[in-house]
Image (cartoon, helix red, strand yellow):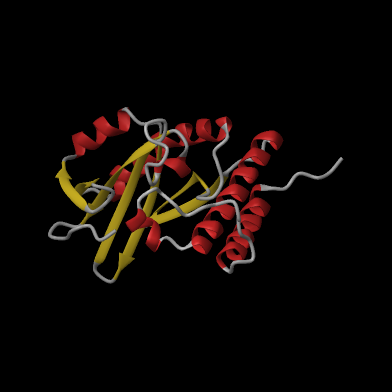
Amino acid sequence: MSRIYTTKELIQILDEERKACLKGQRLNLRATPTVGNPVIDYFLKPEGIQKFTAYQDFKAAIHRYQLENNVSGIIWQEATIHGKTLRYPVVDDQLMALPEDLQRLKAAKPELLHFWHQITEGMNFYLSLNSGKDYQEIQAHEIEAIAQRTEWACLWKWEKSDFLEMLLQLGWGQPGEAKDRRGWPGSGSENIHAVKPGQRPIC
């Protein structure tokens, strides 16, 4: 019986494959860079499309491997803000969430939201609009309403000298598909930014 690759090993394999594809060492020669519009097709580079498609095909094979062998997509992250620390699960960007992974994310959501409320007290909140190109200021009770209709949460921070921005992603479905909305409507998310009064989100 062959051994099963771990989550960490799959992440490393995907990283090596992505680098190989970017270097042109892997191409999907069947991929054709045409969308049917002569003006757009003129600017599409065949090799770029073939590199991208080769990696996407490989990633899909890894996702099938995860399902067949029950290999989790969960990795653990730690955030420390204002002397408070939280360790929480997220799904690696290149892996998929198994059904059990989604249950783990759902179970972690209340503690993550409690941590968010503690560390963002006194900050201003903004909702991302138009894929993060615009922001709309919102109130804490509006965040609660969004949280109630989503399944899981993730947290990121950007910090330098006198600037701190916290990003709360509230989502549903597959996290990897929720980030860029390609899985809509089965997967998706809303991004809430918290910044100090007088500042605006930069991420």
Quarter of the image where the C terminus is located = bottom left
158 displayed left or right of 49: left
Spot occupied by residue 144 in the image (x, y as percentages of width and height): 26, 33
Q: Is residue 156 above or below residue 148?
A: below
Does residue 124 appear in this view? no
The answer to which of 38 and 155 lies nearer the viewer is 38
| Residue at the front extreme of this rendering | 38
Q: Is residue 203 above or below residue 75?
A: below
Does residue 99 appear in this view? yes
200 displayed left or right of 107: left
The answer to which of 32 and 121 lies nearer the viewer is 32
Quarter of the image where the N terminus is located = top right
Spot occupied by residue 101 in the image (x, y as percentages of width and height): 55, 35
| Residue at the top extreme of this rendering | 149
Q: Quadrant of residue 178?
A: top left
Q: Quadrant of residue 98?
A: top right
Spot occupied by residue 175 in the image (x, y as percentages of width and height): 45, 41
| Residue at the left extreme of this rendering | 198
Spot occupied by residue 100 in the image (x, y as percentages of width and height): 57, 31
185 displayed left or right of 127: right
Q: Which residue is at a point 63% across and 59% down the rendered structure image?
A: 17
